[in-house]
Amino acid sequence: MTGNTDDTVWESQGEWDDIRYETTEDGIAKITINRPEVHNAFRPQTLVEVSSALTTAREDESIGVIVLTGAGEKAFCSGGDQRVRGDSGYQTDASATGRFHVTDLHVAMRRCPKPIIAMVAGWAIGGGHVLHLVCDLTIAADNAVFGQVGPKVGSFDGGYGASILSDLVGPKKAKEVWMLCRRYDARTALEMGLVNTVVPLAELEAETITWAREILALSPWAVRLSKLSFHAHEDGYAGIQALAHDANLLFYGQPEAQEGREAFKAKREPDFTRFPRRA
Ligand SMILES: CC(C)(COP(=O)(O)OP(=O)(O)OC[C@H]1O[C@@H](n2cnc3c(N)ncnc32)[C@H](O)[C@@H]1OP(=O)(O)O)[C@@H](O)C(=O)NCCC(=O)NCCSC(=O)CCC(=O)c1ccccc1C(=O)O
């Protein structure tokens, strides 16, 4: 056990260098970027570990909601670790091929059928701001500060960092965020529609858990399909594919689909005549 908030006990799982992965008995997983000395900036290894923890949470049937956060009270995440930014992307070591590992994580977060809540205290800046954008919900502490810094440090995000932001706050405001690199406090972020709620820092985790438990009380399939329904439109073919594959997952549980499987295994022709052709 690693700690608790009110009645919540977090059980620590796995061996990690850059993150913590903890779960509660009632179905919440918490992934914490644990590099407070650099305001939780991510290096490639950080993103590999977050992705791995996300897969663990996704495949654990006892988990219904995932919380993404940063260690300490000063920062959610300050984006890519500028010390390992090479000329071809971010590098695991000086001789490694550079990449933008974070874009693969964005896709995995969108693809993950379980709701992901960003729990934001302090800085959510640059790629750290994009990470909260990609989460489904954001609970902000009153000390949170949001913003993009790409054009200041020679970077931009033409993927989710532009599109989700534009959908949330409108194209004019989104261009302001990226083209002026201003900082926005938590109250302003709430007014802009960037976050779901703002609470005192001391109540951040308790509030996040309350939201997570409200979700956990609902139908898992309906929550899952709700998330994928938004992305079906927003993510184009990839979004439609995720929703359609869930329809197929549900169909696999039906006698009609099972007849096809059983007939193949028994080396006989399938008999679908007893199944209705519904309106
Ligand atoms: C966040 C700050 C404004 C906070 O300022 P302050 O409170 O004064 O703290 P500092 O003293 O500056 O920081 C403390 C300590 O942390 C180090 N640090 C902070 N941020 C980083 C960082 N990103 N990388 C490395 N180190 C960092 C800082 O140097 C201090 O260390 P000392 O040893 O004490 O000196 C301020 O810290 C700040 O402006 N930080 C930098 C923000 C930044 O430039 N972020 C990177 C933006 S680019 C990016 O994120 C890439 C994103 C990406 O990869 C991508 C690629 C493709 C598509 C999408 C994306 C995407 O955007 O996700």
Image: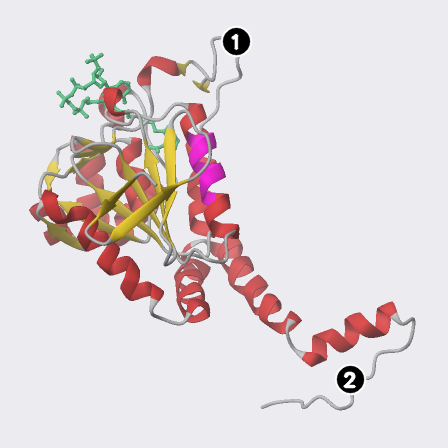
Q: Which contiguous range is marked in magenta?
A: 47-54
| Residue type at tag 2 | Phe
Label 1 and label 2: CA atoms lie apart by: 59 Å
Q: Which mark is residue 218?
A: none
Report how many numbered discs are placed on residues in the image. Answer: 2
Residue 134 lies, in percent from the top left, at: 34, 46
Describe residue 80's horizontal placement relative to residue 59 as left or right.
Answer: left
| Residue type at tag 1 | Ser
The secondary structure that dominates the magenta segment is: helix
Query: Can residue 27 be seen?
Result: yes
Please tell me in which quadrant of the rendered image residue 276 appears.
bottom right
Which is more N-terminal, label 2 or label 1? 1
Viewport quadrant of the C terminus: bottom right
In magenta stretch: residue 249: no
In percent of the image, x 22 and y 28: which residue is there? 149
In percent of the image, x 15 and y 54: which residue is there? 197
What residue would you read off at disc 2?
Answer: 272
Tell me which image quadrant ligand 1 sits in.
Answer: top left
Query: Can residue 195 be seen?
Result: no
Describe residue 17's horizontal placement relative to residue 202 as left or right.
Answer: right
Q: Which mark is residue 95?
A: 1
In percent of the image, x 50 and y 58: which residue is there? 61
Toward the viewer: 32 or 103?
32
Describe residue 165's horizontal placement relative to residue 74 as left or right.
Answer: right
In percent of the image, x 53 and y 58: which residue is there? 242
Does any atom of ligand 1 lie closer than 8 Å to the CB of label 1? no
Does any atom of ligand 1 lie closer than 8 Å to the CB of label 2? no
Asked which secondary structure carries label 2, the reply is: loop
Q: Tell me if mark 1 has few (under 14), some (14-19) or many (20+) residues whose alpha carbon lies within 10 angstroms of its own.
A: few
Asked which secondary structure carries label 1, the reply is: loop
